[in-house]
Amino acid sequence: MPQNTLYLDDARIGRFRSQARKLYQSFLDFVADSPSSRNVLNFLIDGTGNASSINVKNQRSLKAWRGVNRLRESLAKGFANTTTRDVYLASRSRALMQLGARMLTRTCHQCLSIDLNWPVYQHELAEEAKQVDCDIIVGRIQDRIIADRWDIDDICNYLSDVYARYRCDGLLLPAVDSMGIRLPIVEIVDRLRANNEVRFVVVDAAQALGHTDLSEIANAADFMVAGTHKWVGSYIPLSVGLATNPKSQPWIANFLNSAIDAKSGDDSLMHMLHSIDNGRDTRFPETVNLGGLFAGYGAWTATPSPRSALPIRISNADCVASIAEYNGWNALRPDESLRTGSLVLQSTEPQTRKRDGDSLRDSFAEAGMMLSTYGKGIMRMAMPDQLFTTEQFLFIPACSHGQSLGAQSKAFCACNKTRAVIAIDQSREQPTEAKLRRRCKDKVLER
């Protein structure tokens, strides 16, 4: 990526973190010397702890890799009551979601999903439901969250009503949807469990891993599906399945072991790791791309805690929104309790709203900004986990014409720094939005 490009598209595919890139490249150098050696398998399992499996040169460059179970241990670390046995790895998230949808439809008769779910995953759920006696109920909340400014209570009240009315007993929900809306998973599940039977909960965490704090929903969800190639920044895909609820972990383990044994879930990496875990013969495995394990490990160990990074992302989003609103864009933000590090903007210009998403994306790319675009003049920015610098704010195009913001951006950069310091200072009383705006305004006037 050219140095003068501002990349704000981690929600689509994340930047290749330097730690991930180095470990991935070191792995490629290692297998270039002996691509089919037994040492590759030993190294995969034991890492550099098995020093005899790699030469001295590669041992130095691969010292960060400690084996696939250390990767699982690192992923499980943030979840209470979750061990390496409860972490499932695959090369494609769709394979894990297929299994998640299968578990959901095999344990429930009426599953509630919502229109914020990723369409591909919604399709997988519908396909699995066709195989058994299970109906899918879809709650419609997307438009109401933005247009009607629904908050946590509004969402919980609506979904509780739909869940009870249709006698549902299972859920498929996104922790964060593709446009950056954070679903209150814990509040929803707690409300439903108070008056209804909730047999199984699957959570799509593709937009949440490395972005928002997933530890708080560990007991609310039975099975979460995520990946490291977005906000975590591995670039090379590695999919992660997490069984975080101790009540359902044994059942999930038995179900997935049987399903993988039966070759359910078309994913060669998942099947190979399953064979290794169970002491099976791996001398003649299907051809497997192992690179995602190394890129995922390098990226995950370098990913900052969402508890500290998310306030910075939101602070960046607020200041970009303030700049954009002066230049013909409206911020489509949900209630404060549902916000994340994604910022969605819509143009106020009729001509821009008529343009297709690809054309709008190309205009921003030509101006030096990478982001996601959609129809009706809508674009999505994934905010970085570091404060924008003055130079980066100067680089932000004001609109699809690619005009820079000049001196005005410098003032808002000072505002951004003020907001971020306030947001991440946990020792202070959390200020109201009005106080934040006043402080930012004062800082701008000082400049």
Image (cartoon, rainbow, N blue to C red):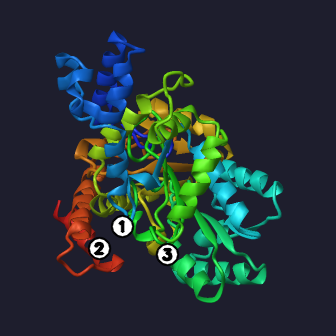
Ranked by sequence position, the earlier of labels 3 and 1 is: 1
Ranked by sequence position, the earlier of labels 3 and 2 is: 3
Q: Amino acid at mark 3?
A: Val
Q: Which SS class for mark 3? A: helix
User: Which residue has dot 1 on it?
Assistant: 80
Ranked by sequence position, the earlier of labels 2 and 1 is: 1
Occupied quadrant, residue 117: bottom right
User: Which residue has dot 2 on it?
Assistant: 436
The structure residue drawn at horizontal position 76% and vertical position 68%, both measured from the top left corner, is: 137
Picture quarter with the C terminus: bottom left
Q: Amino acid at mark 2?
A: Leu
Q: Are marks 3 and 2 in contact (CB under 8 Å)?
A: no
For label 2, the crowd category at 10 Å Cα-Cα, with few meaning under 14, some 14 to 19 and many 20 or more, is: some
Left/right of residue 21 with respect to residue 270 in the rendered view: left
Label ID, residue 186: 3
Q: Is residue 231 above or below residue 27?
A: below
Label ID, residue 143: none
Occupied quadrant, residue 86: bottom left
The CA distance from mark 3 to mark 1 is 15 Å
The structure residue drawn at horizontal position 35% and vertical position 34%, both measured from the top left corner, is: 45
Q: Amino acid at mark 1?
A: Ala
The CA distance from mark 3 to mark 2 is 28 Å
